Image: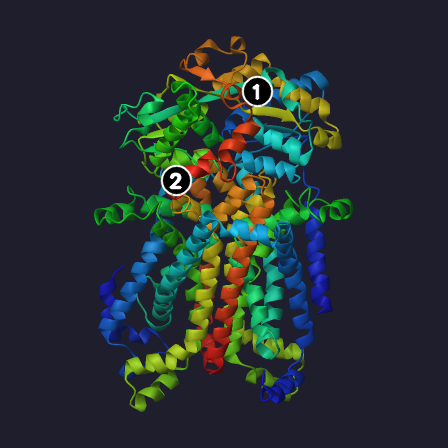
Amino acid sequence: MSLDTAPDSPVRLPFEPLQKTNSVINEPPLVRGLLIGAALAFLSLFLLLPLLSVFVEALRKGLGAYFAAFGDPETLEAIKLTVIAALIAVPLNLVFGLSAAWAITKFEFRGKQFLITLIDLPFSVSPVVAGLVFVLIFGAQGWAQPWFGENVGRVLFSTPGIVLATVFVTFPFIARELIPLMQEQGTEDEQAALSLGATGWQTFTRVTLPNIKWALLYGVLLCNARAMGEFGAVSVVSGHIRGLTNTLPLHIEILYNEYQFVSAFAVASLLALLAMVTLALKSFLEWRYADQLAATRRH
Amino acid sequence: MTAVDRPGRRRSRRTLPGFTPTLGFTLFYLGLIVLIPLAGVFFKASGLGFAGIGQVIGSERVLAALRLSFGAAAIAALLNAVFGSIVAWVFVRYEFPGKRLFDAFIDLPFALPTAVAGIALTALYSENGWIGSVLAHAGLKVAYTPLGIVVAMTFIGLPFVVRTVEPVLREVERDLEEAAATLGARRWQTVLRVIAPAVFPALVTGFALAFARAVGEYGSVIFIAGNFPLVSEIAPLLIIIKLEEFDYPGATAVAATMLVLSFLLLLTINLLQAWTRKK
Amino acid sequence: MRFRHSAIRLVLAAALSAFVPGTQADLLNVSYDPTREFYKDINQQFAADWQAKSGQRTRIQTSHGGSGKQARAVIDGLEADVVTLALAYDIDSIAERGALLPADWQARLPNHSAPYTSTIVFLVRKGNPKGIKTWDDLVKPGVSVITPNPKTSGGARWNYLAAWGHALKASKGDAAKAKAFVTALFRNVPVLDTGARGATTTFVQRGLGDVLLAWENEALLSIGELGPDKFDIVAPADSILAEPSVALVDKNVARHGNRAEAEAYLNFLYTPVGQKLAAKHYFRPSKPELADPADLARFPKIALFRLDEVFGSWAQAQKTHFADGGQFDQIYQSK
């Protein structure tokens, strides 16, 4: 990255619409350069190089081998299953996230920090344990299985188990993204809307949602990325049946274990690309609605 | 809660609708997806009795693994807190070439399956890797040491701090900074007294989340850790080993201990965060 | 709220109804990691054979993973019709803890229910720069040995037991000497991967270590896959006879009503076609006379000892060596 352009920032300032050319609220060029340098160095070491190495491995045998990896019917089945799991997990956690954030940030009640911590808990649960809990419940010796197996159907080693594990692992994402922002924003806007005669639902959709839409989008993107990339928990409940219960991450592991390094990294790069496509979409939306964004930011 | 809070609390509850249904749904969903399943872990572990759990947890090897998991996670979260806030700051405040590209990469550690991340990081940081070979010249061994565990944990927790600090930083009113400047504050004073307090709660949240995620991480860590008992064996690996021996009570005892420790740490951080916000 | 609840219910119901029934296979074979290529061929041949004999079309599905983990999945409810795992101990566990098949399962098929066997050999870097020839070379200072963790990998248990058995024989049954030998060996191990394939990757891709302890079939396969110009196989004078076992899971075939097919599938492994395929995929066939001599020529001559000769039984070996606080754990206890 060309760091050298950064210190000459006064020239670039007009590109940032909100920025006022006011030196008292900006840092000296040297500090800017150092900060940008530190950020880029950190990102390169921990993010860019690992990503690059995935693509280097994936393209080691050329583009032909790269694309051949996606023609495999088992890969397609894995993609399908992964998308299904994400399509169920993300909306569920979206509804939960909105409702939890509303209850927590707009009202005062006892034990709020306790509740927030409980919501955080799935983050700290090792994926290994996240899978194990469902085995303890729905396994052949699990406590819910005798009744559940009779009346509902199989959970473990089939799609419902995979969906459950995914929902569990991605549980806090959207709530956790919304809570700090909504706390920061307070309740004044909503109070104002209500006093002007808006209904509760109108207040939520016309005042709250526009205020939080970017954080909400981040949350959905993160939740989706994690839902598609989850390995540990899903691995425990999947059963690894080829073409039936393998998600993309599990399929990648299998390919890797079969010395099909190119295919493994090609499929992995697909997940990485997926993350980047959704983010490109986000960047586009930000750019497209920059005026609106500025407006909501300024109220 | 003090009596002073009460009037305000009553008023807000009356004016804003939806408290009961949203909290009700939150608790219901939380119970169904998280609490009931996790209760199973404690139930299974309780089969050992207090003495039995104490024996499992008190063993030298389990203690070493817990120390390693929590210690490495704390270091990784700290690294992420420092560099994550710099990254968020740079993204919000400055323009530089490649910014959008880097911005698009940030969430990658979530999308990349942890096993792939582990393999890629090991390839980079082992002694014949791009970074590892450079570090080896400096006499630093990363892969297959506790240092490698920190690297993997930093990677998987990276998005948390950036993504929690970024939106809040965007909200900080630049007018306030200008006001501070006009009142004679130096730039560093403004940053410290005006911006830092506004961002701090979000930063703490990001730290807590990165920490929590790192403590339990398995997939990416086992590739780079070396997995030596007492040295580089993480607690989740011990759980796997106990499961391999069909020692479900032992495995759940370790899992339950990790859960309680993480919960207490997160609760402390969240209370601290709420307290700083009130101040 | 009512709207939300019903929406969720709708989504859940749609998900459950659309995907639960799935397309279950006629036969599910739960196997361990390195058998994928082998069973892919077997499945194809067997399906043709089964159709010719019974007139039924059949679809066989396989699941691969670490042997112990696969055994646990079957115990927890993965409905395997047949299991083809890395060690008899894992199938013993299914019999004991899941009660899915009788405890004497090993007597039901020829050759202790092992249609093919293998052994543990050394994979070294091309030209064998450290001159590694025997087990005793592995404990020399400066030799770096790659083997996965016996606590998490079935293959690694064979490695460990092969080394122990060798030392025990060399010292005429002195257990203390065997322990000292294995301890010295593991002092030369720089990383304990959790699975056999992980260890292979460490050795091959990371370039770590002078010698990899590996299944013979894995070593032969990885040489083929990863470059014959980079590695050599060294066969020690003596090693263990590794017997990956196969078994029918009675409870599950009863539930699925496919016992005849599952039995035919396992018996197929002992037929000339099955034995030829085993040898082709670098497993030592239990009836070598049925296999292709050209394939057999690839197996070096090694004096093989059986596990029960040295360790009694898998249950005993497991208890003495790999259980919590066992011989293996003692190697890593703080000095």
Q: Nearer the viewer, mark 2 or mark 1?
A: 1
Give the image quarter of residue C92. Answer: top right
User: To which chain does the residue with label 2 belong?
Assistant: A
> In 3D space, how far apart are the residues under numbered discs 2 and 1 (Cα atoms)?
43 Å
Instruction: Farthest residue to the right: give it.
Output: A151
Dot 2 surroundings within 10 Å: few (below 14), some, or many (20 or more)? few
Residue A288 location, x and y as percent? 45, 69
User: Could you tell me if residue A113 is visible in this image?
Assistant: yes
Is B58 above or below relative to C121?
below
Q: Left or right: B45 with respect to B99? A: right
Give the image quarter of residue A140. Answer: top right
Residue A185 or A84: which is nearer the viewer? A185
User: To which chain does the residue with label 1 belong?
Assistant: C
Quadrant occupied by the N terminus of chain A? bottom left
Say what secondary structure mark 1 lies in.
loop
Kindly identify which residue carries mark 1: C114
Do marks 2 and 1 share a chain? no
Name the residue type under label 1. Answer: Ala
Image disc number at residue C85: none
Residue A220 location, x and y as percent? 53, 62
Residue B53 or B217: which is nearer the viewer? B53
Instruction: Farthest residue to the bottom: give it.
Output: B183
Say what secondary structure mark 2 lies in.
helix
Is A280 above or below relative to C221?
below
Kindly identify which residue carries mark 2: A63
Name the residue type under label 2. Answer: Leu
